[in-house]
Amino acid sequence: MRANDATILTGPNGTGKTHLLKLIKAVLTFDAQSLIATQYELVRLIFEDNTGVLVQRYVDGPEDQDPFVEMIALVDRRPVGDSLRLDRRVAPRGLPDGIGLVAGQHFVDRQSGLRLPGSFVRSKYGVEPLLSKSDTTADHAALIAIADRPAPVLIETSRLDGIATASATNEEAAPSATARIDEYIENLRNEIIAAKRTSADVTQSADASFAERALAVAKETVNETELRDRYEETVKRFRALSDNALAVGEAPIEFPAVTTPTVRRIMRVFVDDWDRRLAPLLPVNARITALREILDEKLALSGKSTFITAEGTLEFRSRDLSKIALSQLSSGEKHLVALFSSLLFSGVQGSLVLIDEPEISLHAAWKHSFIADSARIAHLMDLQLILATHSTAIINGRWEITEELNFPSREARNA
């Protein structure tokens, strides 16, 4: 696998591309039920630092009876510590919808995002975590270290567009593509609000100490050319933030046409303050800019573009700048928005992202730029991407990053 770039899994139908993506996620999230129920023999995952995890699945008899799994951590590619045995007795069952076990260690309420005390879940549902940092009976420290890494994200693109209906048993309907996008847009808005709040706190602190800091530089020499260059860069950043509804405060004052040593000293403190005020806004601005540039390039084909409101909401506009409802986007456009907004505003920095068949619903021209667009996001978010695809348009000549899966020969299966 390649850091900050995509690894593309290709191969004929049935070679197990989707199966492999789901299995990777199950291993790295310690999903006991999936690891027990999925058919495989052995999985070995190795990270860049030569740590990893080895998972073996055992069955009793030819009918896949009573399967159990053993996991053990790898350090320098060698097993360390005690193995963790998973079977149907310890796999967490009986949890209601909305409560999940994260990385074998923590229970969370998925609706609120809050962690639930293990004692509460144990007493109410009779379920224990698979791993515990307080476990003194087995050495699982290396496995816990793996569980503490950012959890992988699996994006099953076939589900981004589908609108499920409730079944006859009154099961809750799966969210539509529009509902998913609304969730991602809300994540974006919340990040804008949080960044603005941090910037406002910095501004308040800077205002309170401005006079003291101005006096502190009273005898320093400030080069006018260097200061003017810094000022112009700050203005550029402010304007870029303004385009994404992220600017805080009024625009910087004009740089004086004629300066004196005293004016330059005061201006330097002023520019220092502006840089500090803008700093908390820059990371989220970089992600919004990437999202908008990627989407605007594609939406231009139909005369649409993106817009960020003063409240921090992502909207869509027509050529005459009138608002377009999210529901009025085509299925391919919704797919595009859902895919890239989920990567930028629902993933975790530094995580592994697994994408199954990203070509679904994408315009032919969009497929050709998908690897370049996703690589841009991977660098920005420090993500590692693994894609499963049949599409040569998605690969777009990047055969050096592909890994082809093949059916094993009869000789190999019988060896």
Image: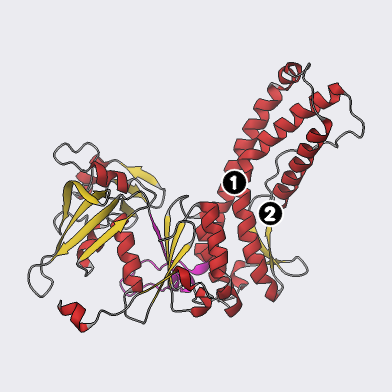
- Extreme-right residue of the structure: 258
Which secondary structure lies at badge 2? loop
Q: Is residue 94 visible?
A: no
Residue 185 falls left or right of residue 37: right
Q: Residue at x 35, y 72 (%)?
A: 18
Q: Which quadrant of the view contains residue 405?
A: bottom left
Residue 320 in the magenta stretch? The answer is no
Mark 2 belongs to which amino acid?
A: Thr
Q: How many numbered marks, from 0 up? A: 2
Q: Which residue is mark 1?
A: 283
- Kindly report the distance in space between the C-alpha atoms of the residues bearing marks 1 and 2: 19 Å
Q: Residue at x 75, y 16 (%)?
A: 215
**Front residue of this view, candidates 181 and 396:** 396
Q: Residue at x 85, y 35 (%)?
A: 255
Above or below, 55 against 220 in this view is below
Residue 177 in the magenta stretch? The answer is yes
- Extreme-left residue of the structure: 61
Q: Which quadrant of the view contains residue 123?
A: top left
x then y, percent, for residue 34: 25, 63
Q: Which residue is mark 2?
A: 309
x then y, percent, for residue 130: 22, 48
x then y, percent, for residue 188: 57, 53
Tell me which numbered mark, 1 or 2, is placed earlier along the sequence: 1
Per the rendered image, the range of residues in magenta is 152-178
x then y, percent, for residue 406: 32, 78
Q: Is residue 410 visible?
A: yes
Residue 402 falls left or right of residue 243: left
Q: 10 Å neighbourhood of mark 2: few (<14), some, or many (≥20)?
A: some
Mark 1 belongs to which amino acid?
A: Pro
